[in-house]
Image (cartoon, rainbow, N blue to C red):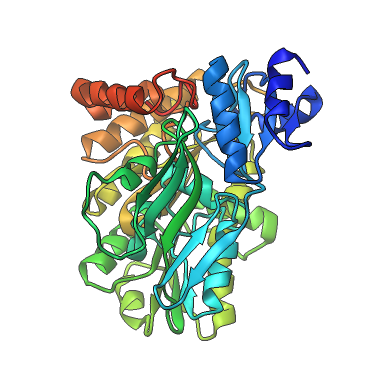
Amino acid sequence: MNELTSALAAALPDGRVLTDPDVTDSYARDRTFVQPGRPLGVVLAETRDDVVATMRWASEHRVPVVPRGAGTGLAGGATAVDGCVVLSLARMTAIRELSPQDEIAVVEPGVITADLDRAAREHGLMYAPDPSSYEISTIGGNLATNAGGLRCVKYGVTRDSALGLEVVLADGRVLNTGRRTMKGVAGYDLTGLFVGSEGTLGVITAATVRLRRAPGEMATVAAEFTSLRDAAAAVSAIVAAGCQPSMLELMDRTTLQAIDDWKNIGLEPSTRAMLIAQAEGSADEMADLCAAASFVAVSSTPEEAAELIGVRRLAYQAKERLGQCLVEDVCVPRSVLPEMITAIEEAAARHGVLIATVAHAGDGNVHPVFVFDRGLAEPPEEVWAAADEVFRAALDLGGTLTGEHGVGLLKKRWLGLETGPVAAELHQGIKQVFDPLNILNPGKAI
């Protein structure tokens, strides 16, 4: 340890600070290809007081702090910068309270998303946000990026389930935002401000989240299409008909082929896309609206439904088997989803790039995954060119650069196209209020 890290270790209980480079390097990156900087050390926080002590030390010595959950992010938001301290919250795993009467839970940031959902279901409730990484991602990371998931089409993103937060600010002060009630309009919405701020305004050490009644028996539809555009059109038809699906997921041929090569799901040669829809009660109307499908199956048991949903959850791991991945997540109005799908296909063809696309199609959140050769430090020029074209197409269609992954490092070069100069100035002003020394996750998100 050097003098700085020795002072940090002295401010914390024994064993909280790691400085061995062979160990700290494993905390320095997320799931992107982004090359991290070299941290001074890693703090393994176990309590709010550990976070307070770390931030007081960092403020005094003007050392950057990069908060981190499970490291499952896909935008480079949790990657270390040179000379920083990585603040790991993965050991803060307590569910402090679960109230079936009030339908809320108070949880620490290291709680695994799926574990909270399982705890809620013991009381006939559910925690609605469910990113594809829900078995390994943490509540803190979900809050930091305003994560989405497969059930967003019905229940919304993480912000829609966040009622209040406990946050440690850059100088070590503790702020409590929001409330335990379903309604509340006192003061500015600071909870909403922190959710999605990617660790640039404060460190979330606890959250009061909304739970919902767990649904009854779910019916699931899987429809295969010979055209990706036809599948996208079926999405629009299902939403327009008012079916209120709790899940409406789309996968293209490249994704399905990767899953089939791995798990042998019996993919037909003519299938170009698959749509998976789920709703409480009958699925017959959704099946009927997939009129252009070459094959439609409706689950008859919970086990069959779980098997169909399981195919969708294999998508990202299957694509990682193809090479390195630039995983993106533009979001457009649902009415123009077919046009967005077409734009992605055209960009892939024009630049000779392999793009595997999945979508939380019910809310217009499209995930084009740009696959490139392993071993490269970053995507080659043609991948960036195709990505640029996709991002601009999303904005031209009235959409956004990111629906749930966040800006991190990967999207910063395009952020100004969406926000404009006035919003950029306000963002910087907000950052200055909460973090005047610019020590919280510097260089990310804004």
Instruction: Evaluate whether residue 296 shows in this view.
Output: no
Q: Position of residue 335 (x, y in %)?
A: 22, 53
Residue at 40% x, 37% y: name it: 197
Direction from residue 97 to residue 296 in the image, left or right: left
Q: Position of residue 196 (x, y in %)?
A: 39, 41
Instruction: Evaluate whether residue 188 shows in this view.
Output: yes
Q: Quadrant of residue 393?
A: top left
Q: Quadrant of the N terminus?
A: top right
Q: Nearer the viewer, residue 398 or 236?
A: 398
Q: Nearer the viewer, residue 77 or 123?
A: 123
Residue at 53% x, 60% y: name it: 312
Q: Quadrant of the C terminus?
A: top left
Q: Position of residue 260 (x, y in %)?
A: 63, 57
Residue at 59% x, 41% y: name it: 49
Q: Quadrant of residue 40?
A: top right
Q: Position of residue 22 (x, y in %)?
A: 80, 26
Q: Nearer the viewer, residue 116 or 187?
A: 187
